[in-house]
Amino acid sequence: MKKRIALLLAGVMVIGMLAGCGGKSETPSSDTAAATTEDGGSGAAAELAGTKIAWVTNQSDAWHHQTAVTTQEKLKENGYTVDLFDTKNDDAKGLECLEQIQIAGDYGLVIYAGNVTQVDAFKKLMDSGTSVVMYSSDWEENHGVVSTWVCSEYDLGYLVSKKAAEQLPENANIVILRGVEGYSGSILRGEGFHAALEEAGRDDITVLAEKFQKFQKADAMTCMEDWITAYGDKIDGVISENDDMALGAIEALRGAGMTADKDHVLVYGIDGLYQGCKAIKEGSIQASAYQNSNDYAEATLTRIQKLESGEMKPTDVEDLTFDAAYIDSSNVDEFLTYYEENGMAQ
Protein backbone atom coordinates (compact mmCIF):
# COMPACT_ATOMS: atom_id res chain seq x y z
CA MET A 1 0.00 0.00 0.00
CA LYS A 2 1.34 3.34 -1.05
CA LYS A 3 0.74 6.03 1.54
CA ARG A 4 0.81 9.71 0.75
CA ILE A 5 0.68 11.09 4.27
CA ALA A 6 0.43 14.74 5.17
CA LEU A 7 -0.32 15.51 8.80
CA LEU A 8 -1.68 19.03 9.02
CA LEU A 9 -3.75 20.95 11.52
CA ALA A 10 -7.22 21.73 10.20
CA GLY A 11 -10.50 22.96 11.70
CA VAL A 12 -12.41 20.81 14.24
CA MET A 13 -15.71 18.77 14.37
CA VAL A 14 -18.46 16.64 16.00
CA ILE A 15 -20.51 13.68 14.99
CA GLY A 16 -23.83 12.12 15.71
CA MET A 17 -26.81 9.94 15.25
CA LEU A 18 -28.47 7.27 13.11
CA ALA A 19 -32.05 8.54 12.92
CA GLY A 20 -33.59 9.04 9.49
CA CYS A 21 -30.56 8.24 7.35
CA GLY A 22 -30.71 4.48 7.34
CA GLY A 23 -27.98 4.06 9.95
CA LYS A 24 -27.26 0.41 10.67
CA SER A 25 -25.15 -0.98 13.49
CA GLU A 26 -24.18 -4.59 14.02
CA THR A 27 -23.25 -3.79 17.60
CA PRO A 28 -25.86 -2.46 20.03
CA SER A 29 -25.04 -0.01 20.54
CA SER A 30 -6.09 23.58 5.69
CA ASP A 31 -3.24 25.40 6.67
CA THR A 32 -4.47 26.99 9.83
CA ALA A 33 -2.89 27.93 13.12
CA ALA A 34 -4.00 26.21 16.30
CA ALA A 35 -5.41 29.40 17.79
CA THR A 36 -7.34 30.81 14.82
CA THR A 37 -8.91 29.22 11.76
CA GLU A 38 -9.31 30.93 8.40
CA ASP A 39 -13.08 30.82 8.68
CA GLY A 40 -12.98 32.68 11.99
CA GLY A 41 -13.40 29.70 14.31
CA SER A 42 -11.46 29.42 17.54
CA GLY A 43 -9.35 26.54 16.25
CA ALA A 44 -9.04 25.17 19.79
CA ALA A 45 -8.65 21.40 19.66
CA ALA A 46 -11.73 19.61 20.97
CA GLU A 47 -11.49 16.30 22.78
CA LEU A 48 -12.43 13.19 20.87
CA ALA A 49 -16.22 12.87 20.93
CA GLY A 50 -16.22 9.06 21.17
CA THR A 51 -14.91 5.89 19.56
CA LYS A 52 -17.92 5.03 17.38
CA ILE A 53 -17.46 5.31 13.62
CA ALA A 54 -20.08 6.48 11.10
CA TRP A 55 -19.69 5.24 7.51
CA VAL A 56 -21.76 7.46 5.22
CA THR A 57 -22.13 6.45 1.59
CA ASN A 58 -24.49 5.24 -1.13
CA GLN A 59 -25.16 1.75 0.23
CA SER A 60 -26.74 0.59 -3.03
CA ASP A 61 -23.39 0.94 -4.79
CA ALA A 62 -21.82 -2.53 -4.72
CA TRP A 63 -18.22 -1.48 -4.05
CA HIS A 64 -19.09 1.17 -1.47
CA HIS A 65 -21.37 -1.23 0.39
CA GLN A 66 -18.78 -3.99 0.31
CA THR A 67 -16.15 -1.62 1.66
CA ALA A 68 -18.46 -0.37 4.41
CA VAL A 69 -19.39 -3.91 5.51
CA THR A 70 -15.77 -5.10 5.31
CA THR A 71 -14.79 -2.22 7.58
CA GLN A 72 -17.70 -2.86 9.92
CA GLU A 73 -16.62 -6.49 10.38
CA LYS A 74 -12.94 -5.59 10.80
CA LEU A 75 -13.68 -2.97 13.42
CA LYS A 76 -16.15 -5.21 15.25
CA GLU A 77 -13.39 -7.81 15.65
CA ASN A 78 -11.34 -5.11 17.37
CA GLY A 79 -14.08 -3.88 19.69
CA TYR A 80 -15.34 -0.87 17.75
CA THR A 81 -18.81 -0.02 16.44
CA VAL A 82 -19.29 1.10 12.84
CA ASP A 83 -22.76 2.43 11.96
CA LEU A 84 -23.73 2.49 8.29
CA PHE A 85 -25.62 5.49 6.88
CA ASP A 86 -27.21 5.46 3.42
CA THR A 87 -27.05 8.61 1.29
CA LYS A 88 -29.04 6.88 -1.48
CA ASN A 89 -26.72 8.66 -3.94
CA ASP A 90 -28.35 11.95 -2.91
CA ASP A 91 -25.96 14.64 -1.68
CA ALA A 92 -28.76 16.43 0.17
CA LYS A 93 -29.43 13.17 2.02
CA GLY A 94 -25.70 12.92 2.70
CA LEU A 95 -25.75 16.35 4.33
CA GLU A 96 -28.78 15.30 6.35
CA CYS A 97 -26.87 12.26 7.59
CA LEU A 98 -23.96 14.46 8.67
CA GLU A 99 -26.32 16.79 10.52
CA GLN A 100 -27.90 13.86 12.36
CA ILE A 101 -24.45 12.57 13.26
CA GLN A 102 -23.64 16.05 14.55
CA ILE A 103 -26.72 16.00 16.80
CA ALA A 104 -25.82 12.60 18.27
CA GLY A 105 -22.44 13.92 19.32
CA ASP A 106 -20.82 10.59 20.25
CA TYR A 107 -18.93 9.59 17.10
CA GLY A 108 -15.17 9.90 16.95
CA LEU A 109 -14.78 9.32 13.23
CA VAL A 110 -16.85 9.85 10.09
CA ILE A 111 -15.93 8.17 6.81
CA TYR A 112 -17.86 9.88 4.00
CA ALA A 113 -18.30 9.46 0.25
CA GLY A 114 -20.45 11.57 -2.05
CA ASN A 115 -20.61 13.36 -5.38
CA VAL A 116 -19.69 16.70 -3.79
CA THR A 117 -17.68 17.72 -0.76
CA GLN A 118 -19.57 18.75 2.39
CA VAL A 119 -16.67 20.78 3.74
CA ASP A 120 -18.77 23.16 5.89
CA ALA A 121 -20.51 20.25 7.60
CA PHE A 122 -17.15 18.52 8.00
CA LYS A 123 -15.74 21.59 9.77
CA LYS A 124 -18.70 21.70 12.16
CA LEU A 125 -18.15 18.07 13.04
CA MET A 126 -14.45 18.65 13.61
CA ASP A 127 -15.20 21.62 15.84
CA SER A 128 -16.92 19.14 18.17
CA GLY A 129 -14.15 16.56 18.34
CA THR A 130 -14.90 14.20 15.46
CA SER A 131 -12.29 13.26 12.89
CA VAL A 132 -13.49 13.26 9.27
CA VAL A 133 -12.29 11.37 6.21
CA MET A 134 -13.71 11.79 2.72
CA TYR A 135 -12.86 8.74 0.65
CA SER A 136 -13.08 7.66 -2.98
CA SER A 137 -12.82 11.21 -4.34
CA ASP A 138 -10.27 13.99 -4.06
CA TRP A 139 -11.64 17.53 -3.76
CA GLU A 140 -9.35 20.55 -3.70
CA GLU A 141 -11.62 22.23 -1.13
CA ASN A 142 -10.83 19.41 1.30
CA HIS A 143 -7.07 19.76 1.12
CA GLY A 144 -5.63 20.62 4.52
CA VAL A 145 -9.12 20.58 6.05
CA VAL A 146 -10.20 16.94 6.14
CA SER A 147 -8.41 13.71 5.27
CA THR A 148 -8.71 12.24 1.79
CA TRP A 149 -8.39 8.49 1.19
CA VAL A 150 -8.38 7.27 -2.39
CA CYS A 151 -7.17 4.52 -4.59
CA SER A 152 -5.52 6.08 -7.62
CA GLU A 153 -8.59 6.61 -9.79
CA TYR A 154 -6.35 7.48 -12.72
CA ASP A 155 -4.53 4.15 -12.36
CA LEU A 156 -7.83 2.25 -12.20
CA GLY A 157 -8.84 3.70 -15.56
CA TYR A 158 -5.36 3.40 -17.02
CA LEU A 159 -4.92 -0.28 -16.13
CA VAL A 160 -8.07 -1.54 -17.83
CA SER A 161 -7.63 0.70 -20.86
CA LYS A 162 -4.03 -0.48 -21.24
CA LYS A 163 -5.28 -4.06 -21.40
CA ALA A 164 -7.95 -2.99 -23.89
CA ALA A 165 -5.28 -1.36 -26.04
CA GLU A 166 -3.39 -4.66 -26.10
CA GLN A 167 -6.41 -6.78 -26.98
CA LEU A 168 -8.74 -4.75 -29.19
CA PRO A 169 -8.50 -5.51 -32.91
CA GLU A 170 -7.08 -3.08 -35.44
CA ASN A 171 -9.45 -0.20 -36.28
CA ALA A 172 -11.70 -1.15 -33.36
CA ASN A 173 -14.83 0.81 -32.51
CA ILE A 174 -15.56 1.18 -28.80
CA VAL A 175 -18.09 2.76 -26.47
CA ILE A 176 -17.27 4.09 -23.01
CA LEU A 177 -19.60 3.99 -20.00
CA ARG A 178 -18.75 6.82 -17.63
CA GLY A 179 -19.75 7.25 -13.98
CA VAL A 180 -20.94 10.59 -12.60
CA GLU A 181 -20.27 13.81 -14.48
CA GLY A 182 -18.14 16.21 -12.43
CA TYR A 183 -17.20 13.55 -9.87
CA SER A 184 -13.42 13.54 -9.41
CA GLY A 185 -13.18 9.75 -9.59
CA SER A 186 -14.94 9.73 -12.95
CA ILE A 187 -12.80 12.56 -14.25
CA LEU A 188 -9.61 10.70 -13.35
CA ARG A 189 -10.79 7.31 -14.58
CA GLY A 190 -11.74 8.91 -17.89
CA GLU A 191 -8.33 10.56 -18.14
CA GLY A 192 -6.71 7.20 -17.47
CA PHE A 193 -8.81 5.52 -20.17
CA HIS A 194 -7.79 7.97 -22.86
CA ALA A 195 -4.16 8.28 -21.76
CA ALA A 196 -3.59 4.52 -21.97
CA LEU A 197 -5.02 4.35 -25.49
CA GLU A 198 -2.92 7.33 -26.58
CA GLU A 199 0.30 6.03 -25.00
CA ALA A 200 -0.24 2.66 -26.67
CA GLY A 201 -0.38 4.44 -30.03
CA ARG A 202 -3.90 3.16 -30.68
CA ASP A 203 -5.04 6.11 -32.77
CA ASP A 204 -6.78 3.54 -34.98
CA ILE A 205 -9.40 3.02 -32.24
CA THR A 206 -12.60 5.04 -32.70
CA VAL A 207 -14.73 6.02 -29.70
CA LEU A 208 -18.26 5.81 -31.09
CA ALA A 209 -19.94 7.14 -27.96
CA GLU A 210 -19.18 8.05 -24.36
CA LYS A 211 -21.89 8.71 -21.80
CA PHE A 212 -22.32 9.15 -18.03
CA GLN A 213 -24.61 6.52 -16.47
CA LYS A 214 -24.08 7.19 -12.73
CA PHE A 215 -22.39 3.82 -12.13
CA GLN A 216 -25.83 2.15 -12.37
CA LYS A 217 -26.25 -1.25 -14.05
CA ALA A 218 -29.83 -0.63 -15.23
CA ASP A 219 -28.97 2.77 -16.72
CA ALA A 220 -25.94 1.32 -18.48
CA MET A 221 -28.03 -1.51 -19.90
CA THR A 222 -30.53 0.96 -21.38
CA CYS A 223 -27.71 3.10 -22.75
CA MET A 224 -26.04 0.06 -24.32
CA GLU A 225 -29.33 -0.96 -25.92
CA ASP A 226 -29.49 2.48 -27.54
CA TRP A 227 -25.90 2.15 -28.76
CA ILE A 228 -26.62 -1.29 -30.21
CA THR A 229 -29.58 0.20 -32.07
CA ALA A 230 -27.35 2.99 -33.40
CA TYR A 231 -24.15 1.05 -34.16
CA GLY A 232 -25.06 -2.65 -34.14
CA ASP A 233 -22.18 -5.04 -34.77
CA LYS A 234 -19.78 -2.18 -35.42
CA ILE A 235 -19.11 -2.19 -31.65
CA ASP A 236 -15.90 -4.10 -30.89
CA GLY A 237 -15.37 -3.10 -27.27
CA VAL A 238 -16.88 -1.59 -24.13
CA ILE A 239 -14.83 0.18 -21.47
CA SER A 240 -16.75 0.88 -18.27
CA GLU A 241 -15.97 2.89 -15.16
CA ASN A 242 -17.28 0.06 -12.99
CA ASP A 243 -18.20 -3.61 -13.21
CA ASP A 244 -21.90 -3.02 -12.58
CA MET A 245 -22.23 -0.95 -15.75
CA ALA A 246 -20.11 -3.48 -17.64
CA LEU A 247 -22.52 -6.20 -16.53
CA GLY A 248 -25.44 -4.07 -17.71
CA ALA A 249 -23.76 -3.69 -21.10
CA ILE A 250 -23.25 -7.47 -21.30
CA GLU A 251 -26.95 -8.07 -20.62
CA ALA A 252 -27.85 -5.64 -23.40
CA LEU A 253 -25.46 -7.37 -25.81
CA ARG A 254 -26.95 -10.76 -25.00
CA GLY A 255 -30.45 -9.39 -25.40
CA ALA A 256 -29.51 -8.28 -28.90
CA GLY A 257 -28.06 -11.68 -29.77
CA MET A 258 -24.47 -10.42 -29.50
CA THR A 259 -21.64 -12.06 -27.57
CA ALA A 260 -19.29 -10.55 -25.00
CA ASP A 261 -16.02 -12.50 -25.09
CA LYS A 262 -12.46 -12.27 -26.40
CA ASP A 263 -13.51 -13.16 -29.95
CA HIS A 264 -16.47 -10.80 -30.26
CA VAL A 265 -17.21 -7.72 -28.10
CA LEU A 266 -14.46 -7.17 -25.51
CA VAL A 267 -15.69 -5.69 -22.23
CA TYR A 268 -13.60 -4.08 -19.46
CA GLY A 269 -14.65 -2.88 -16.01
CA ILE A 270 -13.43 -1.49 -12.70
CA ASP A 271 -13.97 -2.66 -9.09
CA GLY A 272 -13.28 -6.40 -9.28
CA LEU A 273 -16.28 -7.29 -7.13
CA TYR A 274 -17.62 -10.84 -6.96
CA GLN A 275 -20.04 -10.59 -9.89
CA GLY A 276 -17.39 -8.88 -11.99
CA CYS A 277 -14.89 -11.61 -11.13
CA LYS A 278 -17.44 -14.27 -12.08
CA ALA A 279 -17.81 -12.54 -15.45
CA ILE A 280 -14.02 -12.56 -15.88
CA LYS A 281 -13.96 -16.27 -15.05
CA GLU A 282 -16.64 -17.02 -17.65
CA GLY A 283 -14.91 -14.78 -20.20
CA SER A 284 -17.52 -12.06 -20.69
CA ILE A 285 -15.34 -9.41 -18.99
CA GLN A 286 -11.72 -9.41 -20.10
CA ALA A 287 -10.23 -7.47 -17.20
CA SER A 288 -11.06 -5.27 -14.24
CA ALA A 289 -9.06 -2.96 -11.99
CA TYR A 290 -9.54 -3.39 -8.27
CA GLN A 291 -9.44 -1.11 -5.25
CA ASN A 292 -9.08 -3.26 -2.16
CA SER A 293 -11.80 -2.76 0.47
CA ASN A 294 -9.39 -4.15 3.07
CA ASP A 295 -7.07 -1.17 2.59
CA TYR A 296 -9.88 1.14 3.72
CA ALA A 297 -10.81 -1.15 6.62
CA GLU A 298 -7.22 -1.27 7.88
CA ALA A 299 -6.86 2.50 7.51
CA THR A 300 -10.08 3.06 9.49
CA LEU A 301 -8.87 0.80 12.32
CA THR A 302 -5.51 2.57 12.42
CA ARG A 303 -7.16 6.01 12.44
CA ILE A 304 -9.56 5.30 15.34
CA GLN A 305 -6.74 3.71 17.33
CA LYS A 306 -4.54 6.77 16.78
CA LEU A 307 -7.41 9.04 17.80
CA GLU A 308 -8.17 7.00 20.90
CA SER A 309 -4.52 6.92 22.00
CA GLY A 310 -4.05 10.64 21.39
CA GLU A 311 -1.43 10.09 18.70
CA MET A 312 -3.76 12.01 16.38
CA LYS A 313 -6.18 14.83 17.16
CA PRO A 314 -9.61 15.08 15.51
CA THR A 315 -8.27 18.11 13.65
CA ASP A 316 -5.31 16.30 12.09
CA VAL A 317 -5.30 15.52 8.38
CA GLU A 318 -3.81 12.31 7.03
CA ASP A 319 -4.18 11.69 3.31
CA LEU A 320 -3.71 8.14 1.98
CA THR A 321 -3.47 6.80 -1.56
CA PHE A 322 -3.86 3.05 -2.09
CA ASP A 323 -2.55 1.03 -5.02
CA ALA A 324 -4.85 -0.28 -7.73
CA ALA A 325 -4.68 -4.01 -8.50
CA TYR A 326 -5.31 -5.74 -11.81
CA ILE A 327 -7.61 -8.73 -12.34
CA ASP A 328 -7.88 -10.92 -15.42
CA SER A 329 -8.16 -14.63 -16.17
CA SER A 330 -4.65 -15.25 -14.82
CA ASN A 331 -5.47 -14.29 -11.21
CA VAL A 332 -9.26 -14.16 -10.94
CA ASP A 333 -9.48 -17.48 -9.06
CA GLU A 334 -7.72 -16.03 -6.01
CA PHE A 335 -10.24 -13.19 -5.85
CA LEU A 336 -13.21 -15.55 -6.22
CA THR A 337 -11.82 -17.76 -3.46
CA TYR A 338 -11.35 -14.74 -1.20
CA TYR A 339 -14.95 -13.60 -1.71
CA GLU A 340 -16.35 -17.09 -1.15
CA GLU A 341 -14.28 -17.76 1.98
CA ASN A 342 -15.27 -14.42 3.50
CA GLY A 343 -19.00 -14.61 2.85
CA MET A 344 -18.87 -11.96 0.11
CA ALA A 345 -20.01 -14.14 -2.80
CA GLN A 346 -23.06 -12.14 -3.80
Image: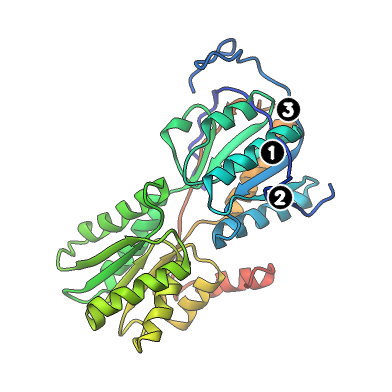
Picture disc at residue 23: 2
For label 3, the SS is: loop
* Residue 262 relative to residue 66: left or right: left
Of residues 299 and 224, the one drawn nearer to the viewer in this rendering: 224
* Residue located beneath label 3 in the image: 48
For label 1, the SS is: helix
Kind of residue sitting beneath label 2: Gly
Of residues 22 and 8, the one drawn nearer to the viewer in this rendering: 22
Kind of residue sitting beneath label 3: Leu
* Residue located beneath label 1 in the image: 100
For label 2, the SS is: loop
Res 212 quadrant in image:
bottom left
Coordinates of residue 289 in the picture (x, y in percent): 44, 62
**What's the CA distance linking mark 3 and mark 1?**
18 Å
The answer to the question of whether label 2 and label 3 lie on touching residues, with beta carbons closer than 8 A, is no
The answer to the question of whether label 1 and label 2 lie on touching residues, with beta carbons closer than 8 A, is yes
Which numbered mark, 3 or 1, is in the foreground of this view?
Answer: 1
Q: Is residue 16 above or below residue 159?
A: above
Kind of residue sitting beneath label 1: Gln
**What's the CA distance linking mark 1 and mark 2?**
10 Å
Label located before the other in sequence (3 or 1):
3
Name the residue at 37% across, 51% down: 181
